[in-house]
Amino acid sequence: MAAGYLDILRARHAARLLTGTLVGRLPNGTASIAIVLFVRAEGGSYSIAGALAAVYGLATAVGQPLLGRAVDLYGQPRVQLPAAVVSALGMAVLAVAGTGSLALAYAAVAVAGLFTPPLEGGLRALWPSVLGGEDRVHRAYAMDAVAQEIMFTAGPLLVTLLVALWSPATALLVINAIGVLGALSVVLSEPSRAWRSAPREAHWLGALRSPGLLALLGSFFFVGLALGSITVAAMAYADDQGRESVYGWLMAALGLGALLGGVVYGARQWAGAPERRLRVIVALLAVGYLPLVLTPGPVAMTVLAAVAGVFLAPAVACSFIVVDRHAPRGTVTEAFSWLVTTFGVGAAVGTAVAGPAVELGGTAWSFAVAGAGGVAALLVLLATGKVLVAPPRTAVAVRGSENDRNGAVEPGFSSGHQA
């Protein structure tokens, strides 16, 4: 199982690009907890902390596809590094100025979110030129999904360590400085400097003119909703048990399940169209979420959380393949950025919906939101089956010019090329 991943990491530039991207994304992956800890240390309320975190999240959702389109038009170094610097400066303003002026605080987090560099989409655009074979690219997508789980687990731990050693303001400054270094490592690499998007047809909708991509985004909005609701539902469950540590166990189990699922999924080659495979995986994801409404004792609930997480990373990894196949020519970074945005917006909505669900019907209702999100994600895929059919293969694939080197893209579509 590990041999396939080692093969990926041994490829020239692969380890550097993966590590640089994960490090560069630390500010985004830890922003919510860092902002909350900082605001509370400044004497601000949870309401202010939540509002600032929400503004950051919404600004990121707006900025990712816009910056992704800019990357497709102008290349990675000219967009990724300046964006990372501006984003870090926004957080630095918050750390230095504090919350004495709420208008300045909101503006600072808005700038930080809006200019969060689309490193995630950029990495997926680079994998084909670095790895070559389609099977290796698909395995890299799975490894990418697994690495995300590690980052979202280790990132908050790093923030809390920095807070314990110094202060929340220092944590904000250090995390964002590290993020700039990660982005710098990526854009100075040969693949990033050489990469150019394929020529694109001028269209104001950009990547969103692909019906298949729209169908996928609609589904993953609800996957995000399910995951976002679980974070609130798990906290409510921990309160019911009278033990805050239960929340940590549930979230760790969810992450562990996703990590194991992603490792197993990426370790083998899969036959058949990824669109059909995605429907099966999302169906299993929905089935995994539904038993959470039973809310048994902590041990059994932790097991259910681990099972619920198993199919998340495979679903994300498979969605990367579908994005790559359906993104209009020359829009690959933008298309991947839209997936990140849609998933994030769905998670924010799930968090917002789960709170009232707890108050209206108790913890079980909030977990029911997750189950409903999983079912809705599946229904979207089933309802849009006609636009998610496998794109017909093109007659030729220019060497080094297509993300899908087997030509499994729609006629006239391609993802990017190496200059």
Image (cartoon, rainbow, N blue to C red):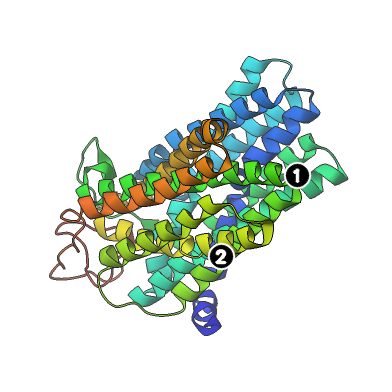
- Residue 391 at what x, y percent from top left? 18, 62
Q: Are marks 2 and 1 in contact (CB under 8 Å)?
A: no
On screen, residue 74 versus residue 391, left or right, reads right
Numbered disc 1: secondary structure: loop
- Residue 281 at what x, y percent from top left? 37, 64
Labels 2, 1: front one: 1
Along the line of sight, the residue nearer the viewer: 369 or 332 = 369
- Residue 119 at what x, y percent from top left? 50, 51
Q: Amino acid at mark 1?
A: Gly
Numbered disc 2: secondary structure: helix
Q: Does 131 appear above or below 194? A: below
Q: Does 270 appear above or below 411? A: below
On screen, residue 364 versus residue 194, left or right, reads right
The residue pinned by badge 1 equals 242
Residue 401 falls in image quadrant:
bottom left
Q: Which residue is rendered at x = 43% and y = 52% of the image? A: 121
Mark yes or no: residue 133 visible: no
Q: Amino acid at mark 2?
A: Gly
Q: Does 215 appear above or below 45? A: below
The residue pinned by badge 2 equals 257
Mark 2, other Cα within 10 Å: few <14 / some 14–19 / many ≥20: many
Residue 280 falls in image quadrant:
bottom left
Q: Which mark is residue 67?
A: none
Mark 1, other Cα within 10 Å: few <14 / some 14–19 / many ≥20: few
Q: Earlier in the sequence, mark 2 or mark 1?
A: 1
Q: Which residue is rendered at x = 52% and y = 60% of the image? A: 309
Q: Which residue is rendered at x = 36% and y = 46% of the image? A: 334
Of all residues, the one furthest to the right in this rendering is: 165
